[in-house]
Image (cartoon, rainbow, N blue to C red):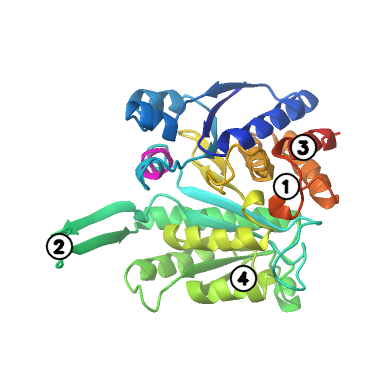
C-alpha cells in the first residue's frame, strides 16, 4: 500500500490534480495498484488566512508519505518567493530531493515550434541538480534600499552533490540505451559499443571555480561508464543547439540554475508547459519524492476549467515509476499518447476548445 500525499495548491493546481487523481483511480483498478491518498491544505489561501506556509508538524506528516503529488504553487495575493521558497524549496531540501528529472518528449499529434522536427528528434531527459547552486540562499544585502546597495547571491557546489547528480545522469543514459540505443550516436560510436550519451552543461570558461569542479567530476565519472558517450557544452551553446538540432541530445546533466532555464526551453520544444512533467527525486528513498507539472498556478486561467491536465497526468506516471508500479505508469503514458494523437479533445494551449475535464475523461477512456 503506497501512501500518496496530495498538495493541490493554488490556481489551476486543484483542477489538474483532480483529473490526475481520477486517472490514477481508473489505472489502479486495472493494474491492481493499492494506494491511499492523504490531502494537505498548503498554498496561498492558507497563508493568507493563517500566515502559515509549511508548518513543521505538516512537514513531518508529509515525511511519512511514500510520494507527494503537487499541483501548483503561486498566488497573486502573496508576494513572490514566499510560497516558492517556503513550500517548493523547503520540501526539496528537507526531503533531500537532490535530483530534478525532466523528460522532454514530443508526442505524435503535438506541434513543436521547431520547423521540420518530430517525435524522433525531440526525446531527451534533463537531470538537474536540485539541492545546491544559487538556490541554497547563501548571500545577503548591504545598505539595502540605498544608492550604495550591494546584493550577493552565492552559488554553492559540493563534490558530493555534483557527483551524485552526474552518476544519476549516467545511470539514466545507460537505462535508456538498454531499452533503445540513442539515435544520435554515429556509426563509429555504435561500433565502439556506445548506447547512450550524457551532455554536461555548464559555463567552465567563465565560472572557473564551481564549474571546474563539475568538469573534473564529469571527466572522472565518465570513465566508469564506457558504454556512454560523454559530451560537454556551454549553457548558451546548449540552448542554441536544443532549438537547431534537438536530436543531438540524450541525457543532459546540469546545475540547478541552468537546469531551471533549460527545462523550460525543453517544455516549449515538446509542445508547451501543459505537457511538461517533473520529478523531484530522493533516489536513496530516505524521504518522499515529489512529482508535479511545471506550468505553475496560471492565475489568469484559474477557475475557467481550460487548463491542460496532461502535465499533471504525466507527473503521476513518473510517480508510479518511482513507486515501483511501471504497469500503470506505462498504461497512462500510452493513454496520453492516444489522446494527444487524436484531433480532439485538446485544450486551448494546444489549439483546441476542450475543457480540462474533457481531456481527463478522454485519457481515462483511453486507458482501455
Image-based side of 331 in relation to 93, left or right: right
| Residue hosting label 2 | 146
| Residue hosting label 4 | 242
Disc on the earlier residue, 4 or 3: 4
Which segment is the magenta one?
A: 84-91
Label 1 to label 3, Cα distance in Å? Answer: 9 Å
CB atoms of marks 1 and 3 within 8 Å: no
Disc on the earlier residue, 1 or 3: 1
What is the chief secondary structure element of the magenta stretch? helix
Image-based side of 56 in relation to 26, left or right: left
Label 2 to label 1, Cα distance in Å? Answer: 48 Å
| Residue hosting label 1 | 347
Q: Nearer the viewer, mark 4 or mark 2?
A: 2
Image-based side of 330 in relation to 10, left or right: right
- Residue at 55% x, 59% y is 264
Image location (x, y in percent) of residue 4: 57, 27
Q: Quadrant of the C terminus?
A: top right
For label 2, the crowd category at 10 Å Cα-Cα, with few meaning under 14, some 14 to 19 and many 20 or more, is: few
For label 4, the crowd category at 10 Å Cα-Cα, with few meaning under 14, some 14 to 19 and many 20 or more, is: some
Amino acid at each position: 500500500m503506497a501512501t500518496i500525499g496530495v498538495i493541490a495548491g493554488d490556481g489551476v493546481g486543484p483542477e489538474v490534480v483532480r483529473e490526475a487523481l481520477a486517472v490514477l483511480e481508473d489505472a489502479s483498478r486495472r493494474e491492481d495498484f493499492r494506494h491511499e491518498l492523504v490531502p494537505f491544505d498548503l498554498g496561498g489561501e492558507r497563508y493568507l488566512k493563517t500566515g502559515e506556509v509549511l508548518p513543521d508538524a505538516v512537514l513531518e506528516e508529509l515525511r511519512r508519505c511514500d510520494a507527494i503529488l503537487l499541483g501548483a504553487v503561486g498566488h497573486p495575493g502573496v508576494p513572490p518567493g514566499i510560497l516558492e521558497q517556503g513550500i517548493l524549496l523547503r520540501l526539496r531540501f528537507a526531503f533531500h530531493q537532490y535530483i530534478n528529472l525532466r523528460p522532454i518528449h514530443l508526442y505524435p499529434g503535438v506541434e513543436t515550434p521547431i520547423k521540420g522536427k518530430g517525435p524522433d528528434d525531440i526525446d531527451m531527459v534533463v537531470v538537474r541538480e536540485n539541492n545546491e547552486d544559487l538556490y541554497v540562499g547563501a548571500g545577503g544585502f548591504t545598505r539595502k534600499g540605498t544608492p550604495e546597495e550591494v546584493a550577493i547571491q552565492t552559488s554553492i557546489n559540493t563534490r558530493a552533490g555534483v557527483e551524485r547528480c552526474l552518476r544519476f545522469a549516467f545511470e539514466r543514459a545507460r537505462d535508456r540505451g538498454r531499452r533503445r540505443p540513442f539515435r544520435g550516436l554515429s556509426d563509429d560510436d555504435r561500433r565502439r559499443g556506445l548506447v547512450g550519451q550524457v551532455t554536461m552543461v555548464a559555463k567552465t570558461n567563465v565560472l572557473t571555480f564551481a564549474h571546474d569542479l563539475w568538469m573534473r567530476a564529469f571527466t572522472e565519472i565518465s570513465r566508469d561508464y564506457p558504454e556512454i558517450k560523454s559530451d560537454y557544452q556551454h549553457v548558451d551553446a546548449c540552448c542554441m543547439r536544443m532549438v537547431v538540432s534537438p536530436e543531438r541530445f540524450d541525457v543532459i546533466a546540469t546545475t540547478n540554475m541552468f537546469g531551471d532555464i533549460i527545462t523550460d526551453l525543453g517544455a516549449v520544444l515538446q509542445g508547451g508547459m501543459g505537457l511538461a512533467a517533473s520529478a523531484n527525486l530522493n533516489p536513496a528513498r530516505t524521504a518522499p519524492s515529489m512529482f508535479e507539472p511545471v506550468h505553475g498556478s496560471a492565475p489568469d486561467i484559474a477557475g475557467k476549467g481550460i487548463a491542460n491536465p496532461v502535465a499533471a497526468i504525466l507527473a503521476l506516471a513518473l510517480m508510479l515509476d518511482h513507486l515501483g508500479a511501471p504497469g500503470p505508469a506505462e498504461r497512462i503514458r500510452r493513454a496520453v499518447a492516444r489522446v494527444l494523437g487524436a484531433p480532439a479533445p485538446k485544450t486551448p494551449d494546444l489549439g483546441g476548445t476542450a475543457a480540462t475535464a474533457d481531456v481527463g475523461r478522454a485519457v481515462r477512456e483511453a486507458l482501455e
